[in-house]
Image (cartoon, grey):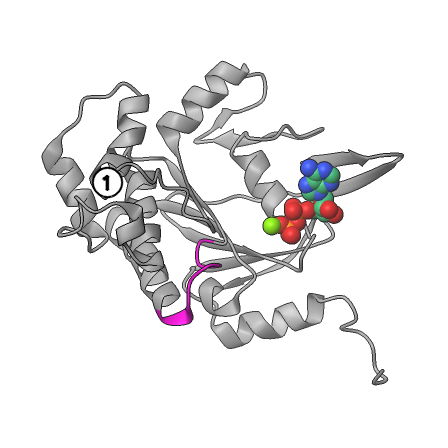
């Protein structure tokens, strides 16, 4: 797929012929230097932004040709989102935040299912707390439970641990990995952190809007080495 942004007189090729597949039930990390197109790829894959050429299939069904309304419905029913900023509603309790996507989708609320969702992310005792009463890691875990409440086909995460310290980040990443392994959840996570990427089963590397390679069974070390080779200036031989 291709995606070009207009910036004044200029055109920025954010995605320059990306061809990628994400198998159901797998955890993939998307990595690349700043500006390589990671967020654009995620936004386009989620139908939040339109591509100029190519196609996006979710479970075999094309996203193109859908009206905004149909896309909104598809996102609500089949996609979950987690971002760097937790984006919880401050006035609502953890439980109410998790219930929100179900209410928006007009689905019946099953209190036992909400309990299970909160327990899954280790917050069984925190349902009545508001976001301000929770730590950053706890807030991101509420956001994760909220994203999973509707049973999405795919969970998109854009730098989900970007605002967390490394210990808390590891807890959230272990949860994500566990959800993939135990429930066969499909997860696509953008990150620039090799440690975060090492929790995925596969890493897809982007540079200048193109896929430049991938690693299966990544470790923080193998990912960091690949990233070092992709960073601008990596080919410099003389010190400056
Ligand atoms: P990453 O998430 O890897 O840092 P992005 O997907 O945000 O990269 O950006 C890819 C390229 O597209 C960059 O050159 C960026 O400046 C450009 N870009 C992203 N969003 C917009 C936008 N809304 N308008 C114009 N250019 C954009
Ligand atoms: Mg980004």
Q: Looking at this rendering, what residue extends furthest in the right direction? A: 9
Q: Residue 230, percent across and down?
A: 70, 66
Q: Residue at x 86, y 84 (%)?
A: 238
Query: Magenta residues, as a range?
Result: 160-167
Residue 213, placed above or below residue 105 = below
Q: Looking at the magenta stretch, what is its main secondary structure?
A: loop
Instruction: Check disc 1 and report the residue beneath it.
Output: 93
Q: Residue 130, percent across and down?
A: 25, 45
Q: Is residue 217 visible?
A: no
Of the 4 image quadrants, the one containing the N terminus is top right
Residue 42, placed above or below residue 72 = below
Q: Residue at x 55, y 42 (%)?
A: 42
Residue 164 belongs to the span the image colors magenta? yes
10 Å crowding of disc 1: few (<14), some (14-19), many (20+):
many
Residue 211, placed above or below residue 167 = above
Decide which of 153, 166 is in the foreground and name it: 166
In the rendered structure, the answer to whether residue 182 lies left or right of residue 21 reads left
Q: Residue at x 48, y 45 (%)?
A: 22
> Which of the 4 image quadrants contains residue 52?
top right
| Kind of element beneath mark 1 | loop
In the rendered structure, the answer to whether residue 181 lies left or right of residue 120 reads right
Tally of numbered tags: 1
Q: Looking at this rendering, what residue extends furthest in the bottom direction? A: 239
Q: Residue 218, percent across and down?
A: 48, 68
Decide which of 57, 72 is in the foreground and name it: 72
Residue 54 belongs to the span the image colors magenta? no
Ligand 1 picture quarter? top right
Decide which of 225, 10 is in the foreground and name it: 10
């Amino acid at each position: 797929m291709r995606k070009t942004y207009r910036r004044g007189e200029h055109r920025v090729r954010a995605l320059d012929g990306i061809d990628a597949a994400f198998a159901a039930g797998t955890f993939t990390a998307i990595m690349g230097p700043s500006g390589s197109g990671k967020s654009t790829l995620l936004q386009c894959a989620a139908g939040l932004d339109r591509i100029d050429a190519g196609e996006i299939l979710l479970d075999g069904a094309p996203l193109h040709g859908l009206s905004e309304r149909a896309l909104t419905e598809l996102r609500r029913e089949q996609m979950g989102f987690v971002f760097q900023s937790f984006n919880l509603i401050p006035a609502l309790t953890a439980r109410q935040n998790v219930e929100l996507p179900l209410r928006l989708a007009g689905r019946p609320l099953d209190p036992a299912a909400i309990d299970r969702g909160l327990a899954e992310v280790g917050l069984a005792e925190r349902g009545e707390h508001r976001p301000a009463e929770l730590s950053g890691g706890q807030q991101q875990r509420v956001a994760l439970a909220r994203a999973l409440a509707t049973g999405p086909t795919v969970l998109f995460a854009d730098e989900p641990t970007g605002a967390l310290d490394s210990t808390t980040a590891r807890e959230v990443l272990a949860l994500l990995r566990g959800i993939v392994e135990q429930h066969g959840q499909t997860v696509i996570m953008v990150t620039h952190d090799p440690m975060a990427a090492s929790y995925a089963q596969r890493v897809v590397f982007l540079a200048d809007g193109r896929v430049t390679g991938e690693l299966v069974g990544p470790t923080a070390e193998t990912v960091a080495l690949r990233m070092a080779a992709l960073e601008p200036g990596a080919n410099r031989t003389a010190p400056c």
